[in-house]
Image (tube, rainbow, N blue to C red):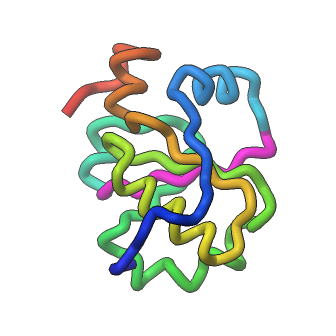
Amino acid sequence: MTGTSFDQPFSPISVEELAQRLAAGDSGLQLMDVREPQEVEIASLEGFVNLPLSEFAEWGEQVPTRFDPHAETLVLCHHGIRSAQMCQWLVAQGFTNVKNITGGISAYSILVDSSVPQY
């Protein structure tokens, strides 16, 4: 996943909107967390599938068959940079409704739920 540029469209979603969607039990969402396993052990949100960017070679080929390219797909990381890279890659793979969670789990902890640990 090198040479990523940010010229293809994907949308941001705020952590507040994410919290509302999760609380509403929106079952149509695909939730991806691209942080490292040790980061997920510190702080995580229920329902997210962990796909560490450092292990892209191990899971990259599975994405088109494991996930629906037309379902709304929300991507999380620590601050929003790695998730933006993943969003870009998903769009390049033909995913049509991709959203980057602005500020990542750090913003979620600060703005939504302080019980989610900071690191």
- 65 horizontally vs 41: left or right: right
Give the answer, above or below, for where 27 lies relative to 95.
Answer: above
Q: How many marks?
A: 0
The residue at 37%/64% (across/down) is 52
In this view, the residue farthest toward the front is 7
**Start-end of magenta stretch:** 27-36
Q: Quadrant of residue 67?
A: bottom right
Give the answer, above or below, for where 21 lies relative to 110.
Answer: below
Say which quadrant the N terminus sits in: bottom left
The residue at 63%/77% (across/down) is 93
Percent from the top left, x then y, of residue 10?
61, 54
Say which quadrant the C terminus sits in: top left
The residue at 66%/52% (across/down) is 73
- 49 horizontally vs 111: left or right: right
Q: Quadrant of residue 104?
A: top left
Percent from the top left, x then y, of residue 38?
25, 52
Percent from the top left, x then y, of residue 69?
75, 67
Percent from the top left, x then y, of residue 51?
45, 63
Give the answer, above or below, for where 70 lies relative to 116.
Answer: below
Judge by depth and name the residue closer to the eye, 90 or 48.
Answer: 90
**Residue 13 sits inside the magenta stretch:** no
The residue at 66%/20% (across/down) is 20
**Residue 32 sits inside the magenta stretch:** yes
